[in-house]
Amino acid sequence: MRTFTSFLVIAALATTHAALAADVPAAGGYAAECGSCHVAYPARLLDQRQWGRVLGDLEHHYGVDATLDDDAALHAVARTLGVPAALTVSGKAALPRITTQPWFVDEHDEVGPATFRSSKVRSAANCSACHVGAEQGNFDEDAVRIPR
Amino acid sequence: MPKIVFLAATLAATLAPVAARSATPEELMRGYAQQARREAQSYSGPSASAGRRFFTTKHGDWSCSDCHTSNPGASGRHTVTGKAIAPLAPAANAERFRDPARVEKWFKRNCNDTVARACTAAEKADVLAYLISVRPGA
């Protein structure tokens, strides 16, 4: 029985680890570098070209300075997001926003602007206010709890 | 059984973030104060009250306290994204001001955002003096 319990613990740990690895790029400092100010958004929420645009202008990152220490840190983040170096470019084009992607607008069409602006949410960028498993990459509708 | 414990520990260690800790907040404050003294001989040392003023004053659109609140012994909230920010005062959060490179990175980012320039060594020493003086729940 004790062995079986230990097996369950290990299986649970291994599953959590696998889920993290699959959904949230945790390696290369991405979680620490980017996840301090917002949820470490899973790579799948933007396409490679869009991520490249974001990484190409971290000095002007949606109104804040999100610069990394050096090129090595930038490359590590790009690698964990699956962005080829050639796509990490600066430019004048507006930064892409996850919250204006058609799939995002569609998925959140039943959530009113007042909910996004409420004191407990504040911003549509604050995924974990409602998606309680967002930090672990879980955006399942079943795991949504809108704070009232 | 020991083998299983070892396996579980290895998995747990894989999940744990790597923490670089090579300084204390007081050491970092003294380092900034020394730098300030090199820059200006008249420098009189870190001041917690000056640090508090700097921390809570709006320098343009923002103040440090907009995100970290006027009580850095408590949790704050990112003013743009709404994400919770762990307490900044070392007495409330032992993780703070332990890694010199991390401290410099955040001063660079946040001073650019808040003061629209790099902070001076004297300002950093003052802010550290203030944060070190804050007691949790105060």
Image (cartoon, coloured by chain):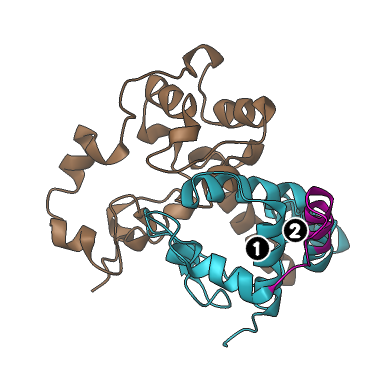
- For residue A28, what is the image quadrant? top right
| Magenta stretch holds residue B124 | no
Q: Residues within 10 Å of mark 1 (few under 14, many from 20)?
A: some
Which region shows up in magenta? B30-47
Q: On the rendered structure, is A70 left or right of A51?
A: right
Q: Amino acid at mark 2?
A: Ala
Vertical side of A79 occupied by A4: above or below:
below
Q: On the rendered structure, is B128 left or right of A18?
A: right
Secondary structure state at the residue bearing disc 1: helix
Vertical side of B13 occupied by A69: above or below:
above
> How far apart are labels 1 and 2 at the CA level?
8 Å
Residue indicated by mark 2? B8
Which chain is tinted brown? Answer: A
Q: Residue at x 45, y 51 (%)?
A: A38
- For residue B129, what is the image quadrant? bottom right
Q: Amino acid at mark 1?
A: Val
Where, quadrant-wise, is the N terminus of chain A in this rendering?
Answer: bottom right
Secondary structure state at the residue bearing disc 2: helix
Labels 1 & 2 near each other (Cβ < 8 A): yes
Where, quadrant-wise, is the C terminus of chain A in this rendering?
Answer: bottom left
| Magenta stretch holds residue B40 | yes
How many numbered markers are drawn? 2
Task: Return the residue nearer the eye: B29 or B117.
Answer: B117
- Tell me where residue A64 appears, x and y as whole percent: 44, 43
Q: Which mark is residue A77?
A: none
Task: Return the residue nearer the eye: A74 or B106.
Answer: B106
Which chain is tinted cyan? Answer: B
Residue indicated by mark 1? A9
Q: Residue at x 22, y 61 (%)?
A: A117
